[in-house]
Structure formats: C-alpha cells, structure tokens
Image (cartoon, grey):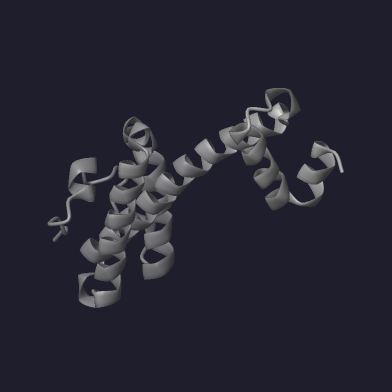
Amino acid sequence: MNTFQLYTTDFHAWTQEQANLLKTQQWDTLDTVNLIEELETLGRKERQELRNRLAVLLGHLLKWQFQAEKRSNSWLSTIKEQRIQIKLLLQDSPSLKPYLEEVFLTAYELGLALAMRETQLGEQVFPEICPYTSEQTLNSDFLPN
C-alpha cells in the first residue's frame, strides 16, 4: 500500500510509518504534503485548546461573580482546573503566550455566551468588555466578588 493510501485508510499506521522514515532519514520517501498539513493542524489545535480553555475559565469567573448565590465547589473546581490546564499548555508550548492576548477578546465572548446559557441571566447583566485582565484570569488567587 502506498503512503497516500495509508494516510487515507489508516492514519495511525501512516504516522508510525512517517516517524520511522524520519528516524531512518529516508527523506525521499516521506509524505511531505500530508506531513506539512498535519503539523499545521497540530499548531491550530493547540491554539484552539488555549482559546477554549480560556473561554470556559472566563465563563465560570463570570458565573462566580454575577450569580454569587449559586456558587458551588463544582464552579471553583472548574476554575482551578482550567487555570492548571492553561498553565500546563503554556509550559508545553511557550510560543502560545503571545496568542493568549490575541485570543482574549474572543475567549471572553465565548465565555460570556457560556455564562448566559448556564445562568439564564440576560446579556445586560454581564459587562460588554471583559472585567478581568489576563493576569487576573490566570492568577490562582483571584476570584471576582
């Protein structure tokens, strides 16, 4: 089975074959077109994960602040977990740190939608602009009042 067929029929086997070809420096045999595409996809997934985790964190911070009477250990646990996961993601991929600021506004919009959906509070209850800085958002000691 040729490399392209393997890529389309058994992705895992294709990855193992490509890794072996790289290890043995068989450059001419590599499926460079699909390797490039997969590497670019990996980078996008890392960015998406950062954006999504930040959105969940911001959504729960909003819930914590604007629905204080319903605060729960579950919300606090989600806030802590997202902060840890973001910290680990940034440790594993430090080049994502500048992207954090770039995606902060979008993450807030997603977090706002999450908070509205989960609290059933109207849009007018929440700030239009994120009330937290990125530093506060990631600070393990910060909880909005």
Location of residue 20 with respect to 113 vertically, above or below? above
Query: Would residue 49 appear left or right of 58 to someone viewing this image?
Result: right
Residue in the foreground of this view, choosing between 85 and 142: 85
Screen quadrant of the N terminus: top right
| Residue at the limit of the structure toward the top, as seen here | 28
Residue 21 at what x, y percent from top left? 67, 35
Residue 120 visible in the displayed image: no
To which quarter of the image does residue 82 belong?
A: bottom left
Q: How many marks overall?
A: 0
Location of residue 50 with respect to 117 vertically, above or below? above
Query: Would residue 91 appear left or right of 7 to someone viewing this image?
Result: left
Residue 33 at what x, y percent from top left? 71, 28
Residue in the foreground of this view, choosing between 68 and 136: 136
Residue 62 at what x, y percent from top left? 28, 58
Residue 108 at what x, y percent from top left? 36, 47
Query: Would residue 65 appear left or right of 119 to someone viewing this image?
Result: left
**Image point 27% across, 69% down: which residue?**
77
Residue 138 visible in the displayed image: yes
To which quarter of the image does residue 41 belong?
A: top right
Residue in the foreground of this view, choosing between 38 and 71: 38
| Residue at the limit of the structure toward the front, as seen here | 24
**Image point 59% across, 35% down: which residue?**
23
**Image point 23% across, 49% down: which residue?**
137
**Image point 28% across, 49% down: which residue?**
87
Screen quadrant of the C terminus: bottom left
